[in-house]
Image: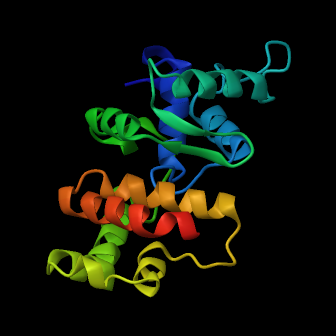
Amino acid sequence: MKIQDELSNTDIVTIGVYTLGGSINPIDLEDLAIEVFNLAAKRFSWKKYKERIDLRIVLYSVNDAIKSDVGYLKGNSKFGYMLTEKGLKWIASLGNIEILTKSSRKHSTSDIVEKEKDRLQRSSAYKKYVDGEKELINIIDFREFTRVNDYFPKQIMKQKFAKIKNVTDEDEILSKVWEYLLTKFASRE
């Protein structure tokens, strides 16, 4: 599959966010611009100066990917962009994404997601919840699960929570644990 010919700009920015690790971490617009330029330079360059990235086209494409009718991305230019559950499913439908990209990764995003999922399942909050002792989950368990504390800026905390949501969305029990923890502790943070 040739990215240049067969995919829309919205699809390409979604792939760019994925290849940069946007299923678990927010991706900066400028990093994304470089990635999509590497994937499809003709689509994301100036008309007159083809060697230059047109950030405006990248931003339009990202905004289109965020719109509810597409819904592949979430975020903003200040704090970065991440894949939504719908975006993750669309990426998975493409099959082997490495064929589509020029990026070589030491660890695939799915490996990173599985590692984070395993960490969450080994947490004391998860164990207490599964053992039917959810009322014994305390703020320390919550902080271990989320890896946040009172000193984290609100936006960083939101990013960490978005990462956890992306990891827990596909696992019914983890999703329930996360919902319970948010209900019980998120207002304190």
Q: Residue at x 53, y 45 (%)?
A: 82
Q: How many marks?
A: 0
Q: Tell me residue 11's x, y (percent).
A: 47, 25
Q: Is residue 37 left or right of residue 182?
A: right
Choose between 103 and 31: the one closer to the eye: 31
Choose between 165 and 59: the one closer to the eye: 165
Q: Tell me residue 153's x, y (percent).
A: 71, 67
The quarter of the displayed image where residue 180 is located: bottom left
Relative to 35, does residue 165 appear above or below in the rendering? below
Q: Is residue 152 left or right of residue 185?
A: right
Q: Residue at x 66, y 20 (%)?
A: 42
Q: Tell me residue 29's x, y (percent).
A: 70, 41
Choose between 53 and 187: the one closer to the eye: 187
Q: What is the quadrant of the N terminus in the image?
A: top left
Taking the view exactly as shown, the residue that stands out farthest to the right is 48
Residue 54 in view of the camera: no
Q: Residue at x 30, y 33 (%)?
A: 94
Choose between 66 and 45: the one closer to the eye: 66
Q: Tell me residue 66's x, y (percent).
A: 54, 28
Relative to 61, does residue 164 appear above or below in the rendering? below
Taking the view exactly as shown, the residue that stands out farthest to the left is 131
The quarter of the displayed image where residue 150 is located: bottom right
Residue 172 in view of the camera: yes
Q: Residue at x 45, y 50 (%)?
A: 23
